[in-house]
C-alpha cells in the first residue's frame, strides 16, 4: 500500500499491510510498491481541484494512474482495477474527462483490466472526506435554507436531478470480489443503489441528525458565477464542476452486479447515516 506519511491511521488493517510512504508522483516509491505485486488497484481521486497547491484532476486522476499502468506493463502485471466514476466521459468536466482518459489508457495497455464507476458514495469515513459529512458541514449546517439547484429558468425542476447513492462497504466488496473473477476482466462496472433526487437526499441526511432543513430553489447559473471567482478557496462549499455534475444527475442500476457477487446492498436511509 502506498500512503502519504502520517496517514497510516487511515488504513483499517495497517498491521496486515506492507506500507510504503510517499506520494503518487514519486516514481521510485511507486515502482517499489508495484514491482512485486500481482494486482494493481488504483483508488486515488479528488472531487475538487486546487491548482495553487498542485492538486489537479490531470495529475491525480490521469498522470498518477498512467504511471502505475506503465509500471504494471513494465513488470508484466496483467490484472489492474481502476476506480473511475459514473459519468466519466471524453467531453465533460475536468473531473469526468481525466477519469475517462485514464480508462482509455488502461484499456490500451493492460490485458485483464476492470473499471469500477461508482455513483455517489456514502458511509462512515473515519475522519476522511465523505459526501454526506461534507454536505452537512459545508451546506446543511449553515443558518440558511438548503439550495435546490435548477438550470435555466424552470424553477419547477429545482432539486429534481437524481443520484444512486451506494455504500462504501458495497463498493469495497465489488473491488475485492472481482480480483480473481474472470467475469470481471475487461468489464466496466457501474455501481449504485436506489435512485433519489436532491431534495430527498437532503431530507434523508438531515433526518439522520434530527433536523428539518428548509429548502429553496437556487438558480445554478448564479451559484456557478460566484464559484467562478471563489471555488479556488477551500472554504467555498462547492465548485463549478460539482454544480455541473449535480445538475446532470448520476444514476445507474446495479441489481445484476450485486446479485452476481451475492451482495445485499446497504440502503441509503437515515438509519445508516448515524455517523452524522
Image (cartoon, helix red, strand yellow):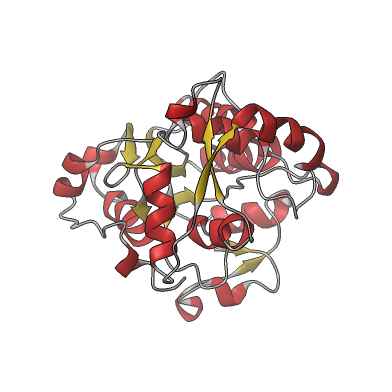
Q: Residue furthest right?
A: 52
Residue drawn 58% across the image and 40% down it: 65
Q: Position of residue 209 (x, y in %)?
A: 44, 71
In this picture, is 172 found above or below 61? Answer: below
In this picture, is 256 found above or below 177? Answer: above
Number of numbered labels in the structure image: 0
In this picture, is 7 found above or below 78? Answer: below
Any part of residue 38 in sight: no
Q: Position of residue 169 (x, y in %)?
A: 34, 62
Residue drawn 58% across the image and 77% down it: 9
- Relative placement, left or right, of 167 versus 138 is left
- Relative placement, left or right, of 241 versus 76 is right
Residue drawn 18% across the image and 58% down it: 264
Is residue 124 or residue 196 the one in the foreground? 196
- Relative placement, left or right, of 69 versus 173 is right
Residue 199 falls in image quadrant: top left
Amino acid at each position: 500500500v502506498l500512503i502519504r506519511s502520517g496517514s497510516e491511521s487511515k488504513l483499517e488493517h495497517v498491521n496486515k499491510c506492507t506500507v510504503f510512504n510517499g506520494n503518487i508522483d514519486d516514481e521510485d516509491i511507486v515502482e517499489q510498491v508495484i514491482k512485486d505485486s500481482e494486482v494493481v488497484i488504483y483508488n486515488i481521486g479528488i472531487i475538487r481541484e486546487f491548482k495553487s497547491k498542485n492538486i489537479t484532476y490531470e495529475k491525480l486522476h490521469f498522470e498518477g494512474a498512467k504511471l502505475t499502468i506503465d509500471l504494471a506493463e513494465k513488470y508484466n502485471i496483467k490484472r489492474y482495477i481502476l476506480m473511475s466514476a459514473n459519468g466519466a466521459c471524453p467531453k465533460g468536466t475536468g473531473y469526468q474527462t481525466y477519469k475517462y482518459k485514464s480508462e482509455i489508457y488502461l484499456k490500451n495497455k493492460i490485458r485483464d483490466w476492470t473499471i469500477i464507476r461508482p455513483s455517489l458514495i456514502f458511509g462512515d469515513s473515519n475522519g476522511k472526506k465523505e459526501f454526506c459529512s461534507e454536505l452537512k458541514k459545508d451546506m446543511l449546517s449553515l443558518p440558511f435554507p438548503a439550495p435546490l439547484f435548477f438550470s435555466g429558468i424552470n424553477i419547477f425542476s429545482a432539486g429534481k436531478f437524481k443520484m444512486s447513492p451506494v455504500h462504501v462497504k458495497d463498493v469495497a466488496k465489488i473491488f475485492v470480489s472481482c480480483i480473481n473473477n474472470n467475469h470481471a476482466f475487461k468489464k466496466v462496472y457501474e455501481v449504485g443503489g436506489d435512485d433519489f433526487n436532491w431534495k430527498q437526499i437532503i431530507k434523508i441526511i438531515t433526518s439522520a441528525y434530527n433536523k428539518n432543513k428548509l429548502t429553496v430553489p437556487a438558480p445554478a447559473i448564479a451559484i456557478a458565477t460566484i464559484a467562478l471567482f471563489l471555488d479556488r478557496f477551500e472554504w467555498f462549499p462547492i465548485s463549478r464542476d460539482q454544480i455541473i455534475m449535480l445538475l446532470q444527475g448520476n444514476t445507474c442500476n446495479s441489481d445484476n452486479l450485486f446479485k452476481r457477487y451475492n451482495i445485499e446492498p446497504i440502503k441509503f436511509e437515515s438509519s445508516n447515516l448515524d455517523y452524522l
